[in-house]
Amino acid sequence: MRRGVSTIGQIVLGALLLFTGTAHLTFARVEFRAQVPSWLPIDQNVVVVASGVVELCLAVALLAAWRQPARGIVGAVTAAFFVAVLPGNIAQFTEHQDGFGLDTDAARAIRLVFQPLLVVWALAVTSAVSTLRSLRRRRA
C-alpha cells in the first residue's frame, strides 16, 4: 500500500513539475517573473527560464528514477530545489508582487505555507532521507 502511494505521489510530483517547467518557458513566463526577488542581480527572464529548465529536468528524473539510490537522490535534489526557490516566494510576499492571482498579502502568505509541503512531499515519496542515510553509512 505505502509503495503504491509513494509511486503515485512521485508520478504526480513529476507531472506537476513538468507542467510548471513548461509554464515557465511558455504561457506563464510573465507571471513567474513576479516571484523573482528585486534584489537578485540577474535578469528576471534568465531566472524564469533557468528555473523552468531545472523543473523540466527534475520532472524527467522523477518520472524515470524508480530504483534506489537514484530515486532518493532525485527526491533530495527536488526538495533542495524547492528550498532554493523559497526566497522568490518570500519576495513575492514581502514586495507585494501580484502573480497567479495572488493579489493580496493573505493569498501570498497562504502560498508560502505550501512551499514546505512540497519539500516534505519530495522527500517522502522518494524515501530520500532513508536512502541518503543508507548511502552515508556505506561510505563510513
Image (cartoon, rainbow, N blue to C red):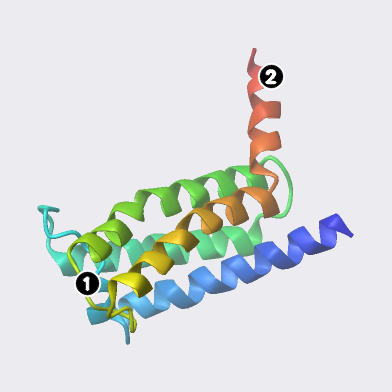
Against 80, is 95 above or below?
below
Work out which residue is located at the far right of the displayed protein and give it.
1
Indicate the amino acid at tag 2.
Arg
Residue 87 at what x, y percent from top left? 29, 52
Q: Quadrant of residue 65?
A: bottom right
Which one is in front, 46 or 116? 116
Residue under label 2, please give it: 137
Question: Above or below — where is 32 with respect to 62?
Answer: below
Please tell me which residue lies in front, 81 or 86: 86
Estimate the x, y position of residue 130 in percent, counting from the top left: 70, 35
Residue at x 19% of width, y 59% of height:
37
Q: Residues within 10 Å of mark 1 (few under 14, many from 20)?
A: many
The residue wearing badge 1 is 33
Residue sitting farthest toward the front = 106
**For the residue carrying disc 2, how many other residues have a C-alpha within 10 Å: few (<14), some (14-19), or many (20+)?**
few
> Where's residue 126, x and y in %?
68, 50
Q: Quadrant of the N terminus?
A: bottom right
Residues at discs 2 and 1 in contact (Cβ within 8 Å): no
Residue 33 coordinates in the image, percent (x, y): 22, 72
Q: Along the polypeptide, which appears first: circle 2 or circle 1?
A: 1
